[in-house]
Amino acid sequence: MLEWYHYLLLVAVGFAVGFINTVAGGGSLLSLPTLIFLGLPAAVANGTNRVAIVIQTAMATAGFKSKGISTFPFNVYLGIAAFLGSLIGAWIAVDINGETFNRILAMVMVAVVLIIIFKPKMRLEDMQERLTGKYLWISLIVFFGFGIYGGFINAGLGFLMMLFTHYINRMNLVRSNATKVTVVFIYMLAALAVFAFHDKVNWKIGLILAIGNGSGAWVASRFSVQRGDGFIKTFLVVAVVIMAIKLWFF
């Protein structure tokens, strides 16, 4: 039985997670420990967190669209590929030591920072988006793999999705963000369905957390469009460094 102040904590944490996930990624590394701290078993915390992410990404998608940012139908194509992968990932139990997994993910986060910092800036003439042909097929294959990981745990995946669409599909970071949130919304529906089927979702707590997630996502989506790529790049670097340190040492 939760106390009244636990609900306030859920909304506050949810707002922070929704903002972080929408602008960059890795917010689940904050919400999952919170849910476990409140007494949910790890598997139920993982499933419950999906309720909030579905609401969060729906609100973020609406927020970007309200600012005129949409990558339809490319985002839907990627979402379908990730949806299929997510069905697999949500059913898989990976036998790996928790500490080892965290350190591997921390190294991935450091690699992300290095790419963000040292990748040469694209010239204006090189920013022609590549959303069709071989680049579409490459993206579908990669996002199928992203979906498998997203269905399994999801934490930290937003960073990689944004970098992929930025450097491979040559989207600016605002459009990469808008693509990411729609893709996550689509594949998260599959993951949530699997967790719910196995009775691993606490709907009450998930919906309360979703109040915060959705609010944070709406604010972040509109704010990031106004501030542009520079703000997103800075936020990405700071968020990735913090997540990498947390994963490695804690």
Image (cartoon, helix red, strand yellow):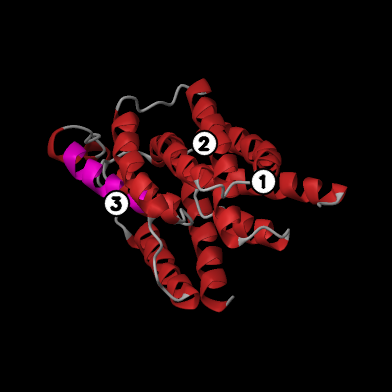
Q: Is residue 120 above or below residue 179?
A: below
Question: Which residue carries the number 2 mark?
Answer: 57
Disc number for residue 145? 3
Magenta residues, start to end? 136-148
The picture places residue 167, in percent across and down from the top left corner, at: 28, 48
Inspect this view and state whether residue 215 appears. yes
Specify the amino acid type for callout 2: Thr
The C terminus, quarter of image = bottom right
The picture places residue 21, in percent across and down from the top left corner, at: 53, 47
- Mark 3 and mark 1 lie on one chain; the one further toward the N terminus is 1
Report if the CB atoms under discs 3 and 1 are less than 8 Å apart.
no
CA separation in Å, label 1 and label 2: 12 Å
Disc number for residue 177? none
Query: In what element is the residue under mark 2?
Result: helix
Question: Which residue carries the number 1 mark?
Answer: 14
Specify the amino acid type for callout 3: Gly
Q: Which residue extends farthest right?
A: 4
The picture places residue 169, in percent across and down from the top left corner, at: 26, 41
Which sits in the foreground, 186 or 218?
186
Give the residue at x 31% y 25%: 73
